[in-house]
Image: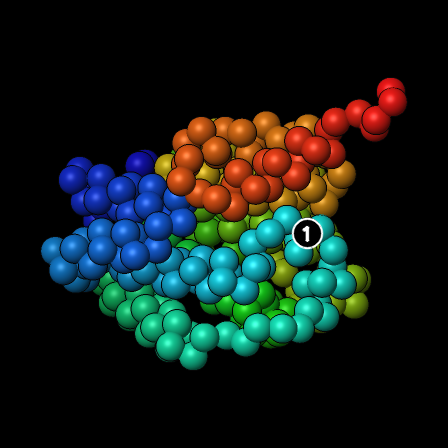
Amino acid sequence: MAGSTLTAGPAAGELDHALARLYNFDFPGTHAVLNRFIAGHPQDPLGYSLRSATYLFHELDRLGVLEAEFFADDKRIIGRKGLKPDPEIRARFFQSTADAQARAEAILARDPENADALFAMCVVQGLLSDYVALVERRSFKSLPYTKRAYACARRLLKRDPTFHDAYVSTGITEYLVGNLPFLIRWLVRFDDVQGSKQKGIENLQLVSRSGHYFRPFAKILLAVIYIREKKPAETAKLLEDLAREYPENPLIRKELTKVRAQLQPPPGL
């Protein structure tokens, strides 16, 4: 990956393997790979960041948050009730985010422009935003984390515009701010964010083509956005790509079946 220093060579291959298991929703397998990686690279913050992502995805899957209908309806995002956060997973999630931040901050204290540390901070802040908004259901409280993730991504991209994975943060921030009411945008004040949904989509499309760790994640986000934007054909194409690449993921297959049903002509036509 351009701009990478800590996670080059065999180490990057280990993280690729971990993410392959994560995108297949093999959470125990992901943890097993990450545990080995962290044992061998205890000061690399990205291992702890991806451990946090594994806890978050596991919890979101358990709560049914990752299903497309959830994101298609803002009322469901804001007002949903039901299952409670798992306290053990919550404790492990916040411990791993703290571990990642501590190591990233230590590196940045020595080297303020270190690409890997900036990327790890960007990932962690995004994960914290997702957990607070989607698991704890405190959308407004999640926005400061979103701002910090965006700031880290902008700082990283200023140093290295080819670090394409960082465009996930800028893309999702642009899209989310574009959907916020004016009053909240005014209160939160995202610096340098236009609130352009189209710009957000373009940034995520870039990651879906040229990203490394987050290329599949960008496709997942785009699939969700296209569902919200009533573009089932575009959603189906992305899900088909993901289903081929991650055949063990049951949610991708389930969502693809739903989208294909939408594309079928009504009976009798």
Q: Quick one: which residue is furthest to the left in this view?
A: 40
Instruction: Check the image and tell me how it is coloured.
Output: rainbow
Query: Residue 26 at x, y = what percent?
Result: 35, 50
Q: Mark 1: which secondary structure?
A: helix
Query: Residue 115 at x, y = what percent?
Result: 32, 49
- For the C terminus, give its image quadrant: top right
Query: Residue 71 at x, y = what percent?
Result: 66, 53
Q: Is residue 250 visible?
A: yes
- The residue located at (39%, 44%) in the rendering is 24
* Residue nearer the viewer, 89 or 115: 89
Q: Quick one: which residue is furthest to the right in this view?
A: 268
* Residue nearer the viewer, 225 or 87: 87
Side of 28 where 125 appears, left or right = right
Residue annotated with mark 1? 69
Side of 195 where 85 appears, left or right = left
Q: Is residue 130 positioned above or below 72 on the image?
A: below
- The residue located at (57%, 73%) in the rendering is 83
Q: Residues within 10 Å of mark 1 (few under 14, many from 20)?
A: some
Q: Is residue 22 positioned above or below 238 on the image?
A: below
Side of 220 where 139 appears, left or right = right
Residue 1 figure quarter = top left
* Residue nearer the viewer, 212 or 164: 212
* Residue nearer the viewer, 91 or 146: 91
Residue 211 figure quarter = top left
Q: Is residue 61 positioned above or below 97 on the image?
A: above
Query: Residue 94 at x, y = what percent?
Result: 38, 73
Q: Quick one: which residue is furthest to the front in this view?
A: 268
Q: Quick one: which residue is furthest to the top in this view?
A: 269
- The residue located at (44%, 43%) in the rendering is 249
**Kind of residue at disc 1:** Glu
- The residue located at (44%, 29%) in the rendering is 244
Q: Is residue 46 visible?
A: no
